[in-house]
Image: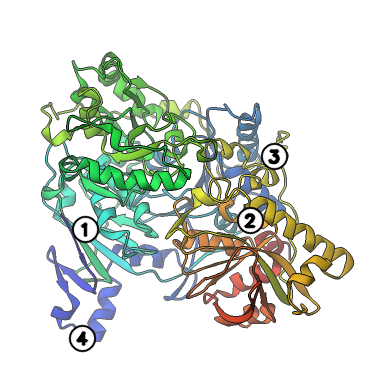
Amino acid sequence: MVKLIKQGVYYADGKLVKESQAFMTSDKKEAAVKNTIAYSVLKAHNAGDAENLKLRFDGIASHDITYVGIVQTAKASGLQEFPIPYTLTNCHNSLCAVGGTINEDDHVFGLSAAKKYGGDYVPAHLAVIHQYMRECAAACGAMILGSDSHTRYGALGTLAVGEGGPELVKQLLKQTYDVKRPEIIAVHLKGKLRRGVGPQDVALAIIRATFASGFLKNKILEFIGSGIAGLSMDYRNGIDVMTTETTCLSSIWETDEKTQEYFREHGRAEAYRKLAPTQPAYYDGAVTVDLSRIEPMIALPFHPSNAYTIREFLENPVELLKKAEEQGRKILGNDQFTLTDKVKDGKVYVEQGVIAGCAGGMYENIAESAEILRDKNVGTGAFTLSVYPSSQPVYKSLVENGYISALMESGAIVKTAFCGPCFGAGDTPSTGALSIRHTTRNFENREGSKPAQGQLAAVALMDARSIAATAANGGVLTSALDYEYVKRIKKYKFDGKIYANRVYRGAGRPQKDTKLVYGPNIADWPEQIALGKHLLMKVVSVLKDAVTTTDELIPSGETSSYRSNPLKLAEFALSRKDPAYVTRAKAVQADEKIRRETGTLPESVLKELNGVIPAEGTVYGSVVVSNKPGDGSAREQAASCQRVLGGVANVCKEYATKRYHSNLVNWGMIPFTCEKPDFKTGDYIYVEEIAAAVAGGEERVVAKVISKNGTRDTVLHLAPFTKEEREILLAGCLINYNRK
């Protein structure tokens, strides 16, 4: 199905040729490097040199979990108006079900900000962020930056990047997104999908083949090849949005007549232009996908890369569920969690199906699911099916073409556009249940259960077609490849009046006299101090997992309601991974406050330092140690919550994504790496002349580790930061840097 080529390749005449077999001269290779679509788009947006990119985006977008913090940060840094189109959507905290009025207070704040600074505002339930941006903002050759990790509009010819909020703040302050020139990987599609195989199946097959090796980490995927022509735009968008789960930086596709028709249907014909690599084009590697061999897939708990064909899974369900069961028991800390009980008489039974969000809620996914369920029913037992169209225009067309009525008659529950099932704020399954979902992620704890309270459910990712086949089979897990149904669906019609009559469009028209409307939960960022001449850190948490997700660093779900209040949100940091973290971090923070007030650390700290006396100018803070943190969401709060609690650094083997690394830097936390981070909770790490090392661009420092077993030296590594990143770290955070 999927093969990797881990060396350079040339693309010409529809074929890939390995660099080792191409016999190209260096000058021809240099020219071919510039022939990719991604290279041309990056060049058009770059204010730096060819290797050190300084990118300016055409537009930015946020949802209601992130835009309050972004606006507050930009305002504290001197924002006067939005210099580029900024779209504020409301699709995460749209239920307004947690914490009384605070979610709707955020929405009111967002509208006031759009009016004051000149932005667009999309009210709750109207569209999920990425569907709206596809319909109304993406354009061929454009670049969009979003404060959500699934910011992907590559199938529409837009190079889109998901990042933490501070990177959007930089764009609002007319600064740049700085990145080393990323490698570009060809994703070569050939063949044609069979009936019953959907975009999620293609995506999961790619993720399974690439995630574990990190082959696509921080790279740009460029989709090329004859197989693209056989894919509808919904299929392309559905594959594209899931590229985030490979840990790539971004993606872009060849465009064609179907792309052109998409823009024409959405009233934006001018947004189209033909994009294709100039031949020969050089890529740093390749992923080849034979679409004709793709089968329906299932990604078992607790990661999208834990994927199998449904056929493979059903041949051996007990053994495969046993592995996930063991992980669940480790999470709970007992043996009460079971998944193998889902297997009865050789069949696998699930309790819930969900088709939702930017990946699952598109028109064709839902329409084809309705055809599978036509004249069938989901049954009156434990199994439930919820369907969330990704926007009101999609919903309206589904209604007009009869698909919503077919779903309702089957017993499916149809709801409005909402991202909640994807991150734990809606349709949380019961304890011990297994939910199958066409959404983007299935990380542990992400579906909304609370392990600390004995709750744990599990999510498996599947395509909408196989979810519908399972629903039609009463909750018995079923591949749509084995299901007979009519695939022909009625044409989608976009109704732009829905947005024209409800979306506030103020981009480029700031009303500077408008007052920002603050609810009682909306709070300013607390002051952060600059990096000291020397740095003393206390290890307050050691995470042993091979990969630590942002959901584990700061849980999603109901905690999202507090993201407009940094101090309240920080109380949830690591709560599902290390419940004692907040208490330990606060103790260090209190001791640092004493140091600032009295000029010396408390006697209790000095005693534990075993005779090591920190030099004058030492700042004291906490540090989290892990192996590979930051997989998953772009949310800046994974870093800022640590900072609010006095965190000054992270130490790990490597960072899972650029997004998390950037979030640490922008919040003034040094992202150290260490070949063997064998620290224990309670250890101290002391680094002399850290400010000079950062300012001078040093890439390694010798630190002193002080533990109960004595004192030793270790080497900590620093990334090659840009000049601006060094200045941000020295200032203590992006807000401080901009205030200067």
Three-letter amino acid code at disc 2? Answer: Gln
Most foreground residue, 687 or 450: 450
Q: CA distance from mark 4 to mark 2?
A: 50 Å
Q: Quadrant of residue 560?
A: top right
Q: CA distance from mark 4 to mark 3?
A: 59 Å
Q: Nearer the viewer, mark 2 or mark 3?
A: 2
Q: Secondary structure at mark 1?
A: strand
Three-letter amino acid code at disc 3? Answer: Ile
Three-letter amino acid code at disc 1? Answer: Ile
Picture disc at residue 224: 1
Q: Which residue is mark 2?
A: 642
Q: Which residue is mark 4?
A: 25
Q: Secondary structure at mark 4?
A: loop
Q: Which residue is mark 3?
A: 522
Q: Secondary structure at mark 3?
A: loop
Report x, y in % for residue 570: 65, 48
Callouts 4 and 1 close, C-beta under 8 Å: no
Q: Residues within 10 Å of mark 4 (few under 14, many from 20)?
A: few
Q: Which of pointers 4 and 2 lies earlier in the amino acid sequence?
A: 4
- The residue lying at 30 percent from left, 19 percent from top is 404
Q: CA distance from mark 1 to mark 3?
A: 46 Å
Q: Which of pointers 1 and 3 lies earlier in the amino acid sequence?
A: 1
Picture disc at residue 117: none
Report x, y in % for residue 517: 70, 35
Q: CA distance from mark 4 to mark 1?
A: 24 Å
